[in-house]
Image: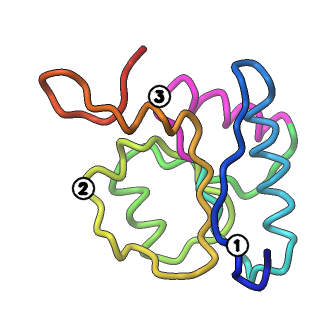
Amino acid sequence: MLDGVHDRGVIWHTQGSGKSLTMVFAARKLLAAGLDNPTVLVVVDRSDLDDQINDTLTARSFDGVMSASRPKELQNALAADRRGVIVTTIHKFRDARADLSTRDNVIAFVDEAHRSHFPRINDGGLGRDS
């Protein structure tokens, strides 16, 4: 809701049901919704999903998308108050400061978020590979 009462939520999809398209359409609506030019983060947990969402955004003629390929690139974009869509992997947040952006209009879509809650055996890393 625009009045700030509801500021988070979950959209559940099964495999192959159109998560990428849902994120693309939702991002497009949010950018046009009068949220004072927001930043929409599309966060995935694997590089193949990063490629897939970037391909989907390109195929849908979504302009102004930034793909943050390195942690520093992501951190600089958020610190510089970049608006629009930023696509990245969750691993690039590993050493990020908590105050990179304190705006109210930063929206995060996290694909496969459940995998980032389980540490890998022995290395304590984010997510599982399978």
- Residue at image point 35% right, 76% down: 99
Q: Nearer the viewer, residue 76 or 49?
A: 49
Up the image or down, 111 lies above or below 63; here it is: above
Residue located beneath label 1 in the image: 6
Which quadrant of the view contains residue 82?
Answer: bottom right
Quadrant of image for the N terminus: bottom right
Secondary structure of the residue carrying numbered label 1: loop
The answer to the question of whether label 1 and label 2 lie on touching residues, with beta carbons closer than 8 A, is no
**Rendering coords of residue 91 (x, y %):** 35, 42
- Residue at image point 71% right, 23% down: 14
Looking at the rendered structure, which numbered label has been put on residue 95? 2
Which quadrant of the view contains residue 31?
Answer: bottom right
Secondary structure of the residue carrying numbered label 2: loop
Mark 2 residue crowding within 10 angstroms, few (<14) / some (14–19) / many (20+): few
Residue 91 relative to residue 27: left or right: left
Residue located beneath label 3 in the image: 46
Residues in magenta, as a range:
43-59
Look at the image and say whether residue 111 sits in the magenta stretch: no
Looking at the rendered structure, which numbered label has been put on residue 91? none
**Rendering coords of residue 74 (x, y %):** 43, 57
